[in-house]
Image (spheres, coloured by chain):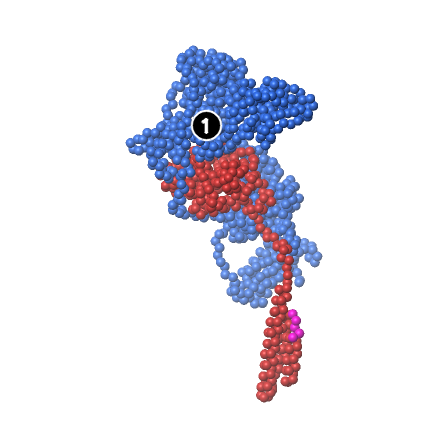
Chain colours: A red, B blue
Amino acid sequence: MEKELEKLRETAKKEIAQIKEKKEDLELIRVKYLGRKGLVTKILRIMKDLSPQERKIIGKLANEIKEEINLLLSLKQEELKQLIYKKDLKEDLDITLPGKPLVRGKLHPLTKILEEIKVIFERLNFDIVEGPEVETEYYNFEALNTPEDHPARDMQATFYISDGIVLRTQTSPVQIRVMEKNTPPLRIIAPGRCYRSDAIDASHSPVFHQVEGLVVGKEITFRHLKSIMKMFFRQLFGEDIEIRLTPSFFPFTEPSAEVSVCCVLCKGKGCSVCQQTGWLELFGAGMVDPNVFKAVGYDPEKWTGFAFGGGIERLAMIKYGISDIRLFYENDLRFLKQF
Amino acid sequence: MKITYRWLKEYVDFDLSAEQLADKLVSLGINVESMQSIGEGIDGVIVGKILSVEAHPHAERLTVCKVDTGKEEYNIVCGAKNMKQGDVVPVALEGVVLSENKLIKPVNIRGVKSEGMMCSAKELGVSDDAAGLFILPEKTPLGKEIKEVLSLPDVVFDLEITPNRPDCLSVIGVAREIAAVLNIPFKLPEIKLKSTGKEIEKQLQVTIKDSLLCPRYLARVIRNVKVSSSPLWLQRRLEMVGLRAINNVVDATNYVLMELGHPLHAFDYDLISNHHIIVRRAEEKEKFGALDEVEYTLTKDMLVITDDNKAVALAGIMGGSNSQVSEGTCNLLIESAYFDAINIRRTSKKLGLSTESSYRFERGTDFEMAEKAINRVTSLIKEIAGGEVVEGIIDQYPQKIVPQQIILRLEQVNRILGIEISGKQIQVFLKRLGFECNLEKNSNLKVVVPAFRREVSREIDLIEEIARIYKYDEISPAVPQWKSLEYSPNQEFLLEREVKNFFVGAGFYEVINYSFSSEDEFKKLGVEDSFYYTKAVKVKNPLSREYGFLRTTLLGNIFENISKNISYNLYNLKLFELGKVFLTKENNLLPEEKKMLSGAICGMAEESYWQKKSNEVDFHYLKGVLVSLLENLEIKNYKMEKGSNILFHPGQSAKIIINGNQQIGQLGKVFPWIAEKYNFDLPVYIFELSLGALLKSQNTKRRYLPVSKYPAVTRDVALVVPKEISYFQVSSQIKKTGGEVISQIKLFDVYQGKQIDEGYRSLAYSIVYQSKEKTLTDKEVNFIHNDVLQSLKENFKVKIRDK
């Protein structure tokens, strides 16, 4: 029996040594010798039939062999692991082959810039609201201190739907709708589509987007307007941008101002985009005209406020270096892919 | 409005360069749209006289001229045709550098020596006239530098004057502003006219029949004028500010219009019947032949200037051809009036006739300037056209206009502007702008508005004036110290963000289109009988046919986007738009504005890639996207029903339905006829969803459901199903029979063909069984699984395919 055991030890040793790659073979050998029905196990199982003396010797030997096989197996396993690592490390890819293209679209640049604008004003504690695009003349003009015979109406070529109904020429009517429904203090921006019957060219589009802002409160002054404009444009175009307010005219604000930023392209030196002036006029703004407050039933002696607004396309054109407004509405994939 | 640097400087002696002046104007609220330098680089061009013009011996089109510059004679070969012997012209001799760095030197042109060049106005850069040589007046001194003759160089400013500043529609108006901001004096032009007699009353009678529409009418008569062309300086000035020189009388009225901002008109005195001017409303359908050679039909709201027989002018807008000044005119009647702004505006709008004159009247003119202007123009005409001014002036001014007074509460200035400015400073500023100020006992300021600032009528208007002169730049920004306001989140905007990001993640590009549609588009889509057309909102005055309606679907524009991109050889497209459609609403002033979410896909699902070629998109690809959107929004109780509306292929489209019967959208292949019209040469799949419906049915609350701790058992089975039974029916039956123990049903193959009987198809499912309470035994799973199969056999005559 001893001999038999010694033979098993030798064959197991040999078999283990012969294993080259497969990890599974280790398990086969373990089962063959040490498994429930394994060759060594079998011997251990029949030991109860032996004399105590023999049992002692054989038992010792069998256990010794069992341990040795286990040891060899684990050594072999380690060896195989190393081999696999080595082989794995030799695997070499052409990492310059193209990766799998991820299927992903893009937001339209107008949406992107509008998102930026919304985020800035949300940070400044403004609410975001919307209003109808088909408007009454009352909201689009009259309530905004622009009566029918006012020459200011010439500033905005208007599309009519029927008598008294227009496609809004500005987002300003939202100011009126919001004030009618709420009591001050108020802080809102109202982005949206506007319409003007201007002939289409590189800087005019019959459909365009504006963002409107309105603040009403106690002790709101022109200085606050200036500060909000500064914060907004600096967050949009960069911390070092200069802004300038110059007098202007809008029927629904008084005093009114044109808000310009130092040309982001030439840094104020003068170029074709800023028409050599060094400045880009971007927003109209001003203190809410008392007549507008009266139209919505606010007491101008109690409340003051400011409003501002401007075209979103123009902001996007400057920010992204787009020279023709029509590109926004052509939806050419080669354009859309760049944002 | 155009104005020149030199002209402005005649009235206000500022010490600013053209650029500095432009900056100053902008800071006052007068926007400079453009600046153009005129007559730079014409140094050395001098005046010469053509002594002879002879044909060039070797070139038909050229002539050889002898030119006298006062000192010497030169031989110049010339290509122009408009000159003759004796003409005085600009001459550029050797060494002169003209625009575009053109150096003049003696040359030989086809065998004839040419010692210089005679110039056109364009070559001098003074106008666009390149038709021939710039012929100067006969008496221009020879040898004189042309830039002196033409008062050059100069800079033309194109100014944008806002509607609230009619006073700035003139040179003196702008000069007054500059003077105010620089705190220097400005002067009005000198008027040399001493004529105070009553003679005029014998020669002219003026009757105002409607003094509301014409509060003031002034007239003068000048006899024995000589109508001819204006002196060069006057012609040049008008040309520089964009007006055409006509004759000395008309030019003088235009000059004073630009100078003082008050419109004037000169009639031929002898063509005014009975020398009687009547200002009255027109009769209904009265005809009027204006200077522009158009006959206008008037209404009784319009104001006309007539004589005893006929209308001679449309008040404040245009004179009549029946009384116009022409070469034969000898005696003049000069009109200077003050008309009601709104009436002029309405008439001008109604007739579609806008002039320099109506432009100013409708914005508001200065009733005091009317008098200065008539005296100024009379004196100018006398100077350039000769004649004798009839003594006296007619001034019909029935009700003297009282200047406006405004009470300014000083504390209001600081309340609005946020600055601290003293009452004293305020008075200084207002006075510089021409306002009279009186401090009252209660420390309010009583302000009298000058006649040229009629639009300043309220306290707030004065505050703006103060801010302008204080300078906006000097008002420092102050961060508002306001209390936070609380807003509830706007679910619609959040959904829009979510949906847009979803589509971008799914590989779609966002498009933005105009909100317009057109008759042609509705026809192209074949929707004339559907709500798409019947509920469309029409634009009364569209830019063109193309934009005649507001859109009722986003798909029309998206089809155009697809077809355009295909024309650029871009075939793999996934586009979406989130935008409004407009539908008329019964008994409602405004239409319904409905936000829609639409899109289209075509071509390959993914970009092809070296390891794997991509598949073409199809109905189920798009369905997968939309189902994923619905699931993303936690909309669970949706179903799809076959068929959709007229834009879709009837057999390859579906309605998306929630809550049993509410349709929220549709998807499918484009109707073949439409696809053909848009030249789609590959299949295009489209969808339309109502954002409002998504908003209502979405579930923004997320609750965590614990995952089962017990093992899952999967059983695969191939079912041979009669074709008329849908996947949906089979799956529902499986779920119904299996109950809660079925945690997932997955279809992994659909097959028909060999081995499958005609009229059947094979659906291969993986069904996952898993309990939340215990480990299922094989026996239990088999029991349920058999139950499931049995119910399919019984209900749908399904056969189980052997593996």
The amino acid marked with disc number 1 is: Lys
In the rendered structure, the residue with mark 1 lies on which chain? B
Tell me where the magenta segment starts and ends, as one range.
Answer: A17-21
Give the answer, above or below, for where A216 lies relative to B327: below
Give the answer, above or below, for where B104 lies relative to A193: above
Residue B411 among those drawn in magenta: no
Q: Residues within 10 Å of mark 1 (few under 14, many from 20)?
A: some
Percent x, y for residue B549?
55, 36
Which residue is at the far front? B71
Residue at image point 38% right, 28% down: B434
Residue at image point 60% right, 39% down: B527
Q: Quadrant of the N terminus of chain A?
A: bottom right
Give the answer, above or below, for where B586 lies relative to A77: above
Percent x, y for residue B714?
59, 63
Secondary-structure class at tag 1:
helix
Dominant SS of magenta comes to loop
Q: Quadrant of residue A64?
A: bottom right
Report how many numbered discs are placed on residues in the image.
1
Percent x, y for residue B634?
52, 53
Residue matched to label 1: B9
Q: Nearer the viewer, residue A228 or A70?
A: A228
In this orientation, does residue A209 appear? no
